[in-house]
Amino acid sequence: MSTKACAVILAGGEGKRMKSDKPKVLSEVLFRPMLRWVIEAVREAHITDICVVTGHKREYVEDYLSTLPFTVETVYQSERLGTGHAVMTALPFLEKHRHEQVIVLNGDAPFMDADTIKSVLQSSQDIVCTVVSAVVGNPFGYGRIVREKNGDALCAIVEEKEATDAIRQIHEINSGVYCFTVNALIDALGKLTKSPRTGEYYLTDTIGIFKENGQTVTVCRSDNADSVLGANDCVQLQELNEIARKKVLHQLMQEGVIIPCPDGIIVGTEVTVGRGTVLLPATVLRGKTSIGAFCEIGPGVLLENVTVPDNSRVNR
């Protein structure tokens, strides 16, 4: 990428339906906060200048970020007045990054991946705004992407409640991730107005501002349909955990790990397992656990932050 980039991650939501004492973005998928998944994807895309917009119980988020082995800036959104207002809160950070690109992401969408971020940054250089989209089987509840006739430029994002029957047939949806040129974003934020219905400022309103100025807004479709997924309650959080669990086990099997029955097997994202090792049901591996080659682990084993040498057997 020839243009330097930074990132703003929105993490101020309360997540009341989680019924948790901590902010929603700290809810865990495979033992890792959703916010950490997003930060890692950004860093894997070679973006190191990151600003997290905090809000509800910000001290929890700030305390967690202080434990990371790298620096992440934070700003506090004292009032939750919409996504546009959240990004306005980060204006001091944006001012330091004029003439760069900025990618804006949601801190509770853990499956946004580095490849998608790199792709949108590469495809949107010198473009004021690019919206990241995804095609899903069931688009109900999501904003639909309506493209111009040429196929690349964005015509509009139409929310479910405002969509016609024809638009509801569209399966390409807004991921909630945007790439802006910083200068254009700062100018557009200064022109945002409150919604008369909700009293909030919406980041999506910047699209209309750009189009009124005759500027092109494009769409970058992610190949990762899971990139749009988030969790508003513990049921949806379990669904994210199951998706992540299956992906990790699938990757391990491709690397030569033998899993004859995946029931109850949970492997964290920092765990390594050597080829030829057998994982048996009800095995839980977490933390920086390292399992050697040609081992047999399980059934009914919990290992955390341990090293198991080659040719070992560990069971209940």
Image (cartoon, grey):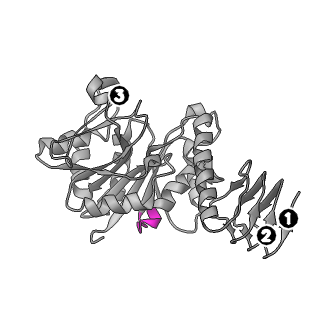
Tell me the distance, in whole angstroms, between the alpha carbons under discs 1 and 3: 52 Å
What residue is disc 3 on? 160
The local secondary structure at tag 1 comes to: strand
Residue 244, label in figure: none
Q: Which residue is mark 1?
A: 314
Q: Which residue is mark 2?
A: 295
Residue 65 included in the magenta stretch of the image: no
Position of 249 relative to 171 (above/below): below
> In this rendering, would 316 be left or right of 2?
right
Q: Amino acid at mark 3?
A: Glu
Position of residue 103 in the picture relative to residue 71 (left or right): left
Choose mark 2 or mark 1, whichever is in front: 2
CA–CA distance in space, label 2 to label 1: 8 Å
Q: Earlier in the sequence, mark 2 or mark 3?
A: 3
Return the residue nearer the eye: 92 or 308.
308
> Which callout, 2 or 3, points to the residue nearer the camera?
2
Residue range corresponding to the magenta coloring: 42-49
CA neighbours of label 1 inside 10 A, class few (<14), some (14 to 19), many (20+): some
Quarter in which the N terminus is drawn: bottom left
Image quarter of residue 270: bottom right
Q: Are marks 2 and 3 in contact (CB under 8 Å)?
A: no
Residue 279 visible, this angle: yes
Amino acid under label 2?
Cys
Q: Amino acid at mark 1?
A: Val
Marks 2 and 1, the one that precedes in the sequence: 2
Q: Report the Cα–Cα distance between label 2 and label 3.
A: 51 Å
Q: Nearer the viewer, residue 151 or 22?
A: 151
